[in-house]
Image: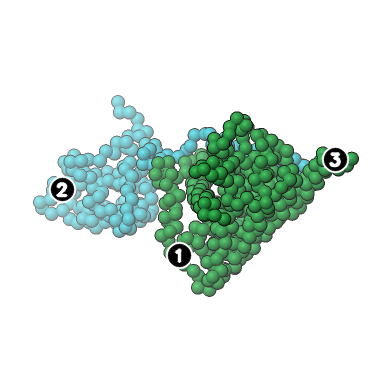
Amino acid sequence: MNTEMFFEKLILVVVLFSVSLLIAMYSTYLERKVAAWLQDRVGPDRAGPFGILQPMADGAKMFFKEDFIPINSDKWLFILAPGIAMFTALITGSVIPWGHNIVAFGRDISLQVADINIGILFILGFVSIGVYGIMIGGWASNNKYSLFAAIRASSQMISYELAMGIAVITVVLMSGSLSLRDIVDAQHGMSWFVFKQPLAFLIFFVCALAECNRAPFDLAECESELIGGYHTEYGSMKLGFFLFAEYINIFISAAVISALFLGGYNFPGMDAFTGNTLALLGIGAFFAKIFLVIFIFMWIRWTLPRFRYDQLMHLGWKKLIPIALINLLITAVVIAFSEGWFN
Amino acid sequence: MESLTNRSKMVSNKKMTFLEKLYLPAIFGGMLITIRHLFQKRNTIKYPEEQRVFAPVYRGQHVLKRDEQGRENCTACGLCAVACPAEAITMIAAEREKGEEHLYREEKYAEKYEINMLRCIFCGLCEEACPKEAIFLTDRIVPTDLQRGEFIYGKDKLVEDVNDRVDISLRQLTGKRKEK
């Protein structure tokens, strides 16, 4: 790999990292504002005009607090856990195609850091490793309640990964490739997969909510309000990492949902544009979809009460997996039929 | 079995219908309700730019009044301290000396009069109990402070200034018949 390519990818990675952090930061602000508006009140509006500097204030608060490690905890695992959570949250953003290729500085720059041909499988794999972050955090805290809550949170995440994977298989069947770039390109114009696979969209959406530990599946979080939760014993920057990793997960989940079902960077009427205009409009469309999905995540959070643990497990194993499998079967039969396998 | 009173609620143990088991129609209905609140007016009062409207009978900080000649009304009789349900008022009485006739109305006066604002519940019973029309509650709000000790208000904060009398007509004249 020559130095030009290296710098191109390096700059892309840095830009992507900053954008992820910025959007996650302002997601916290937006969450508080949306929560307030849905509850007939006004959110934070004192730090800067309209409270825009509130995330800075929160970050500064986290930074200035004492960063402690409990005496009887497993020191290296304790430090490792938020690192794993943050790492897996950020790295999934590297295979998402953010737009068409841009032509700049005499080069054709691809807006995807790594166009590997198993894109969606990479994302599912790293989401699974993200469960380790929570498990290790709960175990290393040397706290009964943390461990218990971490076990519940990780069992929730594992259960919903299965239905998510099956919903993804239906999309892969329709687009014929695991690479995210190909999946998005198969949804040109307005032929998005949400219209062709509404059930898979619904299943994937619900599972994404569960993977992000968002209400109504926020057992892990609510335990931290009630008794403990996997981030009881964490303070300052480590806690900040856990909380931040959750918001980055939300951003990336919204991006994956938009890429798989809502057409990614495609928008109706895109055939009238070419080159850099098309790329920029595509990026704009993609981010509009991402923000819409993030808003719906928040909307759902402030509407629904949370699931009880047994209701959650029942939903994941006994309802979502059979529905996803039936959907997969029907899709497979229809595709086989349309490709002439039964003649 | 017949119920003894008609206050018991009938519990329904009906199984959920298929549509209810889906959860989805109920979820969408709930989301519709929430989104309507996004477009409604917000109920927040943004203090200190906006202030909330107080009732005319609002009970705020106390004031120890003087009469028209500028003499303190309070005679340290202790009825307000006895009436106070939170035991917030304490006082030490003293005898009026020869040259102090212009300061105090009667021979007994309050040398030290303290109200602990953190104990006070602003009920107004001291105002009702006072026989000398000395203590009143006004509509002023007690300001915040950083130390507990600062909340014990002495005579310097409670007795009104001779030249700058505190207006108590808002509370005292509410609900009274207009004078003919």
Tag shown at residue A39: none
> Could you say whether the residue bearing mark 3 is in a helix, strand or loop?
loop
Which residue: 20% across, 41% down? B164
> Could you say whether the residue bearing mark 2 is in a helix, strand or loop?
loop
User: In the picture, which chain is green?
Assistant: A
The answer to whether any part of residue A327 appears in the image is yes
Q: Which residue is mark 2?
A: B103
Q: CA distance from mark 1 to mark 2?
A: 61 Å
Q: What amino acid type should be assigned to the residue bearing mark 3?
A: Gly
Q: Which residue is mark 3?
A: A340
Tell how many labels. Answer: 3
Look at discs 3 and 2 and give the one toward the viewer.
3
- Same chain letter for marks 3 and 1: yes
Which residue: 36% across, 41% down? B48
- Same chain letter for marks 1 and 2: no
Q: What amino acid type should be assigned to the residue bearing mark 1?
A: Asp
Which residue: 54% across, 44% down? A107
Tag shown at residue A67: 1
**Percent x, y of residue A198:** 71, 40
- The residue carrying pointer 1 sits among few (fewer than 14), some (14 to 19) or many (20 or more) residues within 10 Å by Cα, namely few
Instruction: Please state which of residues B15 and A231 is positioned toward the viewer in this rendering.
Output: A231
User: In the picture, which chain is cyan?
Assistant: B
**Percent x, y of residue A92:** 60, 53
